[in-house]
Amino acid sequence: MSFSLAHALTGLFWLGALLLLGGLARRASLWQQGRSASVSWLGLLAMPKRYFVDIHHVVAREPAVARAHVAAAGGGVAILLLSALNYGLMLYQGWLDVLLVLMAAVMLLGARMMQARRLQAPPRLSQGRWQVLPARLRLFALGSLLAAGLLFAGPQLGMAGQLIAVVALLMLALGGAELALGIGLGWPMKHAVAGLLHLAFHPRAERFAGKSSDLKPLNLAAGELGVAKVEDFAWNRLLSFDACVQCGKCEAACPAYAAGQPLNPKKLIQDMVAAQSRGSDPAYAGNPHPGREAAVVVKPGEDIVGSVLAAETLWSCTTCRACVENCPMLIEHVDTVVNLRRHLTLSRGEVPGKGSEALANLRNTDTVGGYPLAVRYHWAIDLDLPVLQPGEQTEWLLLAGEGAFDMRYQRALRALVKVLKAAGVKVAVLGEAERDCGDVARRLGDEAGFQRLAKANIATLAQYRFAHIVTPDPHVFHCLANEYPALGGQFDVWHHSKLLEHLLARRAIPLKADATPLPPLTFHDPCYLGRYNDGFNAPRNVLKGIGIKVVDMQRSGRDARCCGWGGGAAFTDIPGQRRIPDMRMDDIRETGTGRVAVACPNCTAMLEGVVGERADVIELAELVAERLA
Amino acid sequence: MKIAVLVSPAVHPVSGRPCAGEADLAALALAQRLPGELQVWYAGAADDAALADYLARGADNIHSLSLSPDSDVLAALGSALQGVDMVLCGARSGGGDGSGLLPYQLAEQLGAALLPDVLDLSKSDRQWQAVQALPKGVRRTLKAGLPLVASVNPRAATAPGWSYARLQQGKIKRKAATGAALAPVVLEPARRARALVAASKVSGHARMQGAIAGGDAKQAGVVVKQGDSVEKAQVVLDYLRQHQLVDF
Ligand code: SF4
Ligand code: SF4
């Protein structure tokens, strides 16, 4: 009997392997709809490290789920490998059966833990086939356990043994189908195959070597104008969508979703899956974009926006990267949002709300608000701040950014200049020669406008000699530090929080000696400083350095909630149930400090724009200036 | 039907850079709604970059008559537009020395009817019907047969959004042209506006008192202090009815 069971297992193994390969080929043909992309096959070698290290960083934030996954997936992979050896290659070794039984037990445990979690599934998890997956995996694990156990026990079980063998085979077939057919039919276990390939051929492979949050330039001369149809995505981008496990961590982190704007990042990714699979996959069973139907109609050959996706969904995104930060499958939502926006802006010229006005202002005046460049440094008229002339040199070049036109933020800028002067820092500005950095243009999809501004700025900056650039605007900072290099601009750029931290550490800023202790406050992490550039510590160290205790909000640091400005969202202003800054103000209120420190002109404007009772909004530099001796 | 739209660069009020003029854009957008073969024309000395906004906002190509900066565009346009059934242009230029006279002069030269400051154009029977914008929101219907020249109000229609792809695809076709000499521009100082004189020297507070604090019957004002809000509203309504200020 053991002989025939072993052969049945061999047959089942190879049948499963064939089905899996067939399904993979089918899915690969869907990915092939996309454009070619330059990927390195070495990614396949790097896969284990990316799986065990990079993914682990994200998954470990939820330890219980991580343990369940390690047990289920680890057990499952071990079962497959052992089966391949023992039955696939027909070794039929007893000791391998023992190992199999052990691994099956581990997997059973993992699947059990997952099932338990599914009983009280948080609303962010998708239902449908995902809900029944743990049960199927349990079947598979139990089937393996029984089969291997039987084989190890030998032929002496008789009738009962035969019966159990049949049951075990049935279980294996049912459970194994999830994996064997999953990739081809778009069932949940698709994620295992697509996820591993995604790790190998990640569209942003450099993120495994360090931080990578810059948007990639379009080759406008070659006619690249963003993504209109599925075919315009790179093939490995299509692959990345298939890696999604519909865990909804992105949904739970998304400020636009929480505000009831019509954007659910999980659904966005699934919309892309629906578009590329032409609706052949099982229907989506998770939360929709707020206020919209979950069902999508895919019309082959049509543009994605307008058929699968509404434009408002894209324009709701603040590009805060909370979704990317939380995605265990390392999917890059922001790239996709911006790629799709680029088509709307560059080809269709459809930018809602004040977005098109902002872009027109940038074209006509090189400022977002349509201001004359000559007035950018009017707030510094009495501060004796040198305006650099071409050929002149300074150690620090201050770029004030668009905040210089805002009367509220001018106070912060004046405070910053005061502190820098007190610390003896040699600083100068560009005056009229400073243009907008292009952040808003780029996030609103106007890549042509961004490249024009960036190139003009790079050419301007080349005329001056300076060692470092400092800016209080995280958007300027991010653009210059991370996005200008691709266009040929290499600068040593500092956010003012880092410079202040540096100066405080060197005791270069003369502080009041007998300072009375200040009441604690909370700190709002700007997305473009924090998640985009890991600048979590510098502002906190500055506050510590001037003797202020920071009471962090529940959502702070890596998990901070966006203020609602980023990505041009303050301009497109897609309506929702609530406003994002109001929600952030609630977070601030929860700390009970009544004061919030900010380190970005846009966060300042958004949080000060909250109506009714609200916490005081104070810029980092203002707090330091208050402590000056 | 052949339709020609005339466009010219405006001067951006903040930066002084050339950009599209609002009224010309509205003319372009209005023309795109009409059936017929559309041509976009420019005459003058502006370079291609100054016309870029029109390409990006919906003009497939622009015929540009290159003239020296000191020449009058009227003759060159007039001869280029022979045989065109309908000419649309902005009611006023977006800057420079434009006088707003061009549509009138052009209509005269082409022997066409002129519809000034139109908000909308539609066909009725064999004629074209225009909605004309007059001050204070007043509208008037004008009718004319072809050929006609219409100057378009900036609020007539909205051109498509600015698109980089359209800018890349659009073409500017240059033709050399000769223009007549421009009559010298004569600048004169603006006449000083007459100061407003108040009709009565009594203070605002006193006049308000006079209107409400009626002791004798001659004064119209009544202060209603009694009654609930419905009764008070009734008093107001009665007053309005009595003076025929409402008719319900
Ligand atoms: S995109 Fe990532 S975070 Fe969002 S549901 Fe999919 S796997 Fe989870
Ligand atoms: S970047 Fe932020 S706003 Fe945009 S989808 Fe992700 S979480 Fe939502």
Image: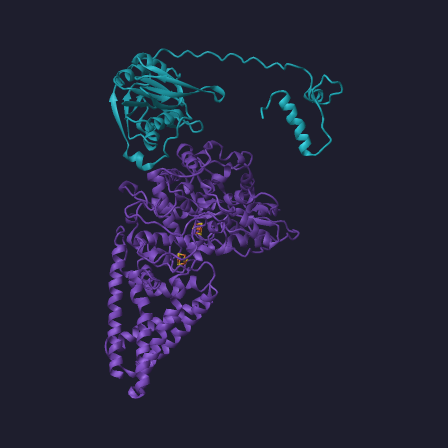
Chain colours: A purple, B cyan
Which residue is farthest right?
B215
If the image is split into quadrants, where does the N terminus of chain B sit? top left
Q: In the rendered image of this protein, does residue A237 appear above or below residue B68?
A: below
Which residue is farthest front?
B248
Q: Nearer the viewer, residue A546 or B131?
A: B131
If the image is split into quadrants, where does the C terminus of chain B sit? top right
For image coordinates 50% across by 40% down, the residue present is A403
| Place of residue B121 in the rendered image (x, y in percent of width and height, measured from the top left) | 36, 23
**Can I make out residue B97 in this image?**
no
| Place of residue A492 in the rendered image (x, y in percent of width and height, measured from the top left) | 42, 47
| Residue A217 occupies quadrant | top left
| Place of residue A152 in the rendered image (x, y in percent of width and height, measured from the top left) | 31, 84
| Place of residue A287 in the rendered image (x, y in percent of width and height, measured from the top left) | 43, 55
For image coordinates 64% across by 14% down, the residue present is B199
Q: Nearer the viewer, residue A463 or A341?
A: A341
Q: Nearer the viewer, residue A197 or A86?
A: A86
Taking the image in four quarters, ligand 1 sits in the one at: bottom left
**Can I make out residue A187 in this image?**
yes
Q: In the rendered image of this protein, does residue B71 appear above or below residue A416?
A: above
Q: How many marks?
A: 0
| B81 left or right, relative to A254 | left
Which residue is farthest bottom?
A156
For image coordinates 39% across by 64% down, the residue present is A53
